[in-house]
Amino acid sequence: MSEQTVSVIVVSRGRPDALLRCLTAVAQLQYRAFEVVVVACPAGIAVTETLDILPDIKCIAFDEANISAARNLGLIHAAGEIVAFIDDDSVPEPQWLRHLVAPAMRSDVVAMGGFVRGRNGISFQYKARTLDAHGGAHEVEIDPLQATVLVPPKGRAIKTEGTNMAFRRDVLMDIGGFDPALRFYLDETDLNMRLARAGHATALVPLAQVHHGFAASATRRDDRVPRDLFEIGASWAVFQRKHIPKEARTAHWAAQITQERKRLLKHMVAGRLEPRDVRRLMKRLKAGYSEGLTRSFGGTRLARHAVLPFRPVNAPRRTSHFKVVRGLRGASAIRDAAVRVGTDRIETVLALSLTALFHRVYFDVSGVWVQRGGLFGRSNRDEPLFRLTTKARRGAKERRRVAAVRGLDGS
């Protein structure tokens, strides 16, 4: 069966450097039939229009602080049968799209969600989660190597993460896409609840992986400390009105206030916030909730026909390579690998020092996947702190760890 066409939608505002890195990784995706739709502010559009490795991007200018409205704008320009979403502060593994959309070959699967790795590039921020009737997320165990298709019981939903999710475009258009009343928070949670209410199945796909950096924004610092809680409060008010019975809303809102206060107090104890910051942020949370009680809902049916025809990327077929070097040779190995990226290769450099340092993985803006750490140190954080090994054995172990997502031989 031929691959389904996919539109990869990236929304960006005020983070052109992060967008450049994201799109550099998107250009290495190993999937035949995909296009790229970027909805961005002027700085993001400027970066996109000069990107030689992705010359056929659909660029849509949008400079408002509303990710739901931006995603809907991307939707009406997207022409793929499937629409996939990734944030500008994330990078996809080369096999991300192939794994993510594979379950759509089943006619009953409407939504797909992958796993998200955190800043060290190894530990997971998000894996498989479900949603309870009040929008609370709960972890669930699934097979770590293959997709699991789930149909939630009444009142619950399957969680997809905003930076790693895909949907059938026609279904998304029929239900009105994302609700612009949810400007950056609970947007995909609301969508998940509406899809579940309609009886649609969701596939959770562990091998569809992206790396998420939590870049700074208008609402949070790069250390994840919030700058403003107004939209979180407003979003909870909108979500309650859409999904939570009236008699349960007061207790639910009290629980959210308690949860946010605890989060802020942890930051204060750690020295990242002052007491006056906590008071200001809690005041903004409550003000947002009051505003959200009067905010109009979105969610009207969107046009089924795309504004522009499908514009395939025509990305080259790349071969994936994995090189192990001593730590001191890491910089030169990365430079050499960056040259080979330009010859249609996917390059991974593992730089090992004679230490027990923890490992970290990152995607260099030059287009090279880099892993650094000690020969005797751990990569997965549940491994022993120290383990005797050789360079060859350690290299083989780390290669196996990423083979399926990086497209290495033997995956």
Image: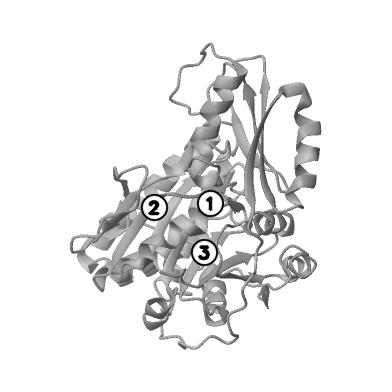
Residue 144 vertical placement versus 101 (above, below): above
Amino acid at circle 1: Leu
3 or 2: tag closer to the N-terminus: 3
Residue type, numbered disc 3: Phe
Residue located beneath label 1 in the image: 281
The residue located at (54%, 42%) in the rendering is: 409
Number of marks in the image?
A: 3
Determine whether 70 is above or below 283 in the image.
below
Left or right, 168 with respect to 373, comes to: left
Q: Secondary structure at mark 2?
A: strand
Above-or-below relation of 166 to 227: below
What amino acid is labelled 2 in the image?
Val
Label 3 sits on residue? 85
| Between discs 1 and 2, the one toward the N terminus | 2
Q: Secondary structure at mark 3?
A: strand
Image quarter of the N terminus: bottom left
Q: Nearer the viewer, mark 3 or mark 2?
A: 2
In the depicted view, which residue is nearer to us: 362 or 12? 362
Distance from label 1 to label 2 (Cα)?
A: 36 Å
Q: In what element is the residue under mark 1?
A: helix
